[in-house]
Amino acid sequence: MPIELLVEAVIAGVLLGCFYAAVSVGLSVAFGLLDIPHIAHPAFLVLGAYGVYVLGEHGIDPLLGGILLIPIFFLLGVAVYRFYHAVFEKRGTDAGLRGLAFFFGVAFIVEVALILTFGVDQRMVDAPYIGKGLALGEFRLPLRMLVSFGVALLLTATLSLYLSATFTGRAIKAVAQDQTALALMGADPVRIKQWAFGIATGTCAIAGALLIVVGPVEPGLGRLYIGRTFCVAVLAGLGSMPGTLAAGIILGVAESVVLTSLGASWAPAVAFGILLLVLAVKPAGLFGR
Amino acid sequence: MKGSTLFATGAAASVILALVLTRVAPSEYFFFAAYVVLQFIVLATAWNILGGYAGYVNFGSGAFFAVGAYTAVVLIKAFDAPLLLQLIAAAGVTGLMGFAIGAMTLRLRGIFFSIATVAIAVICETVVINSAFVGGSRGIAILQPTAPAWFGSYTRLLFAVMALLAVLAVALARYVQTSWIGRGLRAIRDNEEAAESVGVPTLKLKLFAATVSGALMGVAGAPFPLYMSFIEPTSAFSLNYAVSALAMPIIGGTASWLGPVIGAVLLGSLQQIVTVTVSSELNVLIVGLLLVTFVVVAPQGILGLVRKVVGTGAVR
């Protein structure tokens, strides 16, 4: 591969990677910190993208739409967690198998509901920054990738700061380490987890907006993102925010290089390939807790 | 009658019934639909051996099914192999795949194992899409050979073959469940460390369960290209297989061999009816809704509900 092409692929990969980090931070919290087998996370992402699409039909900018959807998704997350806790965590027995089957079923229902409502066609939104490019010397960078890059960095940094600097954020990290100890300190682990899962789902609104800014969405897109989001969350080392960013960039660059050298049809296997490799070699990830 | 004798009688009766049906023949569509239900019995039973008995949730059933189907395609294209050879080869290839995921259980449990099976499914699909020999993403047409005189049409022959496979799969699952292997697998599901420490050969049992489960899934897929006369990656790797393979045992009840059979017959028939009368999207939605409802409301499945009402022990 010529060197210019490689450089271009790496630059595009870094932009793409930050976007992957943004779609994965929610999973890093829900799965990485709370140990919830949240396979429905990518389905919620696509749901967020469609929410933004509907708002876009009424002339609302996708990023603004994403922000407007955060409270709704937060409440959705709280409701899902309360249900999950009451049905699975409390009863305890066999929670693994049934919890997994539950979220798998939820993801499936969301996907089919989207198909029934919107059909299988691809949907996209309009915004001033979609379709334009920024010339940088010889390279041309699509503006929508730069916008998603900026928002993704902001989202990851905010969440990272929130988890390490605020009281509730630290409580969330504490619940990941030792639930019983937290209860002994007088905090209610269930309420903390409910709050954290709400935040994790809330990020799906913003990340979903990025999803539809970066490219057209279709109901089945969630399946592809099971691989990407879990690859990033596991490679990051469960629950680490800087790790999520680093892992996202690794995946983005790898996918971009494969795309340029082998062709687009091999790209979907990259995330899963890295995921299998990490699980086999270093299951604790890069920044394991 | 003793349980085993009763089961053997029922199994033999099912095969004879299937053979008689191919002669009596209500309509060609009957065989087309019944084949799918039987195929789901094999798939659900196979999933249950690893997922239900041992507690390792496989989300990649669709990949095993499709690899079985594509193994058959390769054999047909390469030297027009007969159906029996296709079935054996498919069982061999997907059995090896099963052995591989069995080996992964050494390091991966719970959600990590499940995600790894999704990974295998996507990687297999990508490889098939990029393989021109089996038609790539456009798919490939397969000609049905002429059927032997007894059956009348090739779909009827495939129906009878799938009926035989379903009976064999269920008999195998029942053997695993009632023998010491099943006890060991249940011990693994309930507490793997405890099982290992009292001398249950956990790795051997997991490898066995994963290999048998994988091979049966491949066998379920092997006749698929001939049945459809056409195969392409999107429908062969359809998520519907992965969800159904898991939903049917959970709805029927994972504790016994009878659970997947009940789930597959109920859900499979329902799917056929809804697909014809309403739409195929709706049928997929019903599977998802039923799965979530049963997981939440009746975790022991239909068998568990029946047992609550009747109050007897496990079905043997």
Image (tube, rainbow, N blue to C red):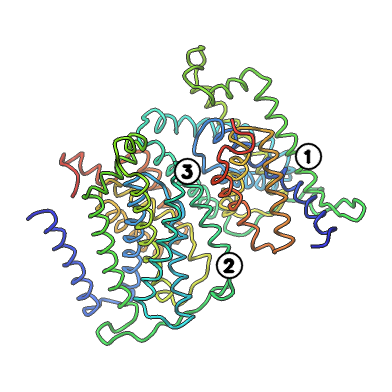
Q: Which residue is mark 3?
A: B108
When the figure is inspected, residue B301 is found, relative to residue A68, above or below; the finding is below
Q: Viewer-proximal residue, A245 or A279? A: A279
In percent of width and height, residue B213 lies at 36, 56
Secondary structure type for disc 2? helix
Quickly name the residue at label 1: A150
Q: Nearer the viewer, residue A50 or A228?
A: A228
Question: In the displayed structure, would residue B34 be above or below residue A49?
Answer: below
Q: CA distance from mark 3 to mark 2?
A: 28 Å
Q: Which mark is residue A272?
A: none
Residue type pointed to by label 2: Ile
The reply to whether dot 2 and dot 1 touch (C-beta < 8 Å) is no
How many numbered dots are placed on residues in this image?
3
| Left or right side of B262 for A217 | right
Q: Is residue B117 left or right of residue A52?
A: left
Q: Which residue is mark 2?
A: B129
Alpha carbon distance from label 3 to label 1: 36 Å
Residue in the image at 58% along x and 67% along y: B129
